[in-house]
Amino acid sequence: MKNGNRISEEFSDEDLQAVLAAITLIESKMPWLLTLTPEESRGLRNLGFDGLPFA
């Protein structure tokens, strides 16, 4: 990354637990979500700069 990481915020433990609980809830409500294998992920086309307006 050219400019590096410019975010300097920290989560409290309570906020982190709340976020993780929300993610768990979302995953339980949407069981059809799946994770791509690394091979499947590499096989997808990259959006690229030229395709950005299309997306």
Image (cartoon, grey):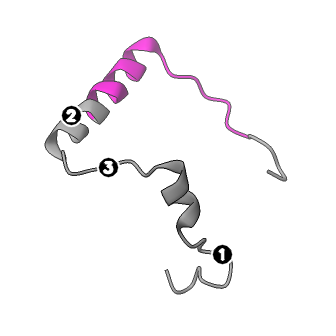
Provide residue 2's location: percent of width, then percent of height. Answer: 84, 53
Write down the residue under mark 1: 48
Q: Give the answer, above or below, for where 24 lies relative to 42.
A: above
Q: Give the range drawn in magenta.
A: 6-22
* Position of 4 relative to 20 (above/below): below
Q: Earlier along the polypeptide chain: callout 3 or callout 2?
A: 2
**46 or 55: nearer the viewer:** 46
Earlier in the chain: of badge 1 and badge 3, it is 3
Going from the N terminus, do you reach mark 2 or mark 1 first?
A: 2
Quarter of the image for residue 4 reads top right
Q: Which amino acid does label 2 sit on?
A: Leu
Which amino acid, mark 1?
Gly
Would residue 8 be counted in the magenta stretch? yes
For mark 2, give the secondary structure: helix
Would you say 26 lies left or right of 13 here?
left
Q: Which residue lies furthest to the front in this view?
A: 39
